[in-house]
Amino acid sequence: MKAAAALVEDLATRARARGLRLATAESCTGGMLAAAMTSLAGSSDWFERGYVTYSNTAKTAELGVPAALIESAGAVSEAVARAMALGARVRSGAAWAVALTGVAGPGGGSADKPVGTVWIAWAGPQGEVSARCFHFVGDRAAVREQAVSAALTGLIDAL
């Protein structure tokens, strides 16, 4: 997988060329995706805002993810990732939003959702939302870095 800096440059080129603004909604990465995106000078041309919604309460308050959905599907789920992405896109006014929710470790995993499980969702301007489950390997830092790269790659592909 390409390094995050190279991915951000590619993303910036595409977003600028299309006049798009982008937003992020992060749980397990705690703002790392937004930090990577804004590390590039001139990112204010295309980066709208980022939400760090680590707690379930924040997902509901900041992104409008229904508490009942979190309760029924679990915070680390396709449904919640999709709701986070859509909430970030709608609330920010950005053309595209990407959301991540997962288990970075070292604890917190289960048989169904082991450490390294990360759901990433992308929401676009026509209301389309896609999501994918990843199973990353490594320590907490490695899982989070891989999640950021996967989120960027998916956003580039979507644009």
Image: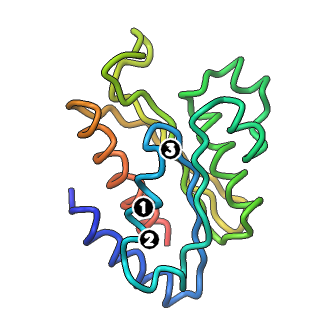
Amino acid on which disc 1 is placed = Ala
Q: Quadrant of the N terminus?
A: bottom left
Helix, strand or loop for disc 1? helix
Q: Is residue 150 above or below residue 157?
A: above
Q: Which one is closest to the eye, mark 1 or mark 3? A: 1
For marks 2 and 3 on the same chain, the one whose residue lies earlier in the sequence: 2
Q: Give the mark toward the camera: 2 or 3.
A: 2
CB contact under 8 Å: marks 2 and 1: yes
117 lies left or right of 92 = left
| Quadrant of res 13 | bottom left
Q: Look at mark 3 in the image and give the residue it sits on.
A: 100
Q: Find residue 144 and report its image quarter.
A: top left
Q: Are marks 2 and 3 in contact (CB under 8 Å)?
A: no
Q: Residue at x 59, y 80 (%)?
A: 20
What amino acid is at disc 2? Thr
- Name the residue type under label 3: Leu
Question: Is residue 26 placed above or below 9 in the rendered structure?
Answer: above
**Where residue 46 appears, x then y in whole percent?**
54, 80
What residue is disc 2 on? 38
Question: Where is residue 79 drawn, in percent x and y?
Answer: 64, 34
Determine the residue positioned at 49% across, 44% down.
120
Q: How far separated are the C-alphas under marks 2 and 1?
A: 5 Å
**Disc on the earlier residue, 1 or 3:** 1
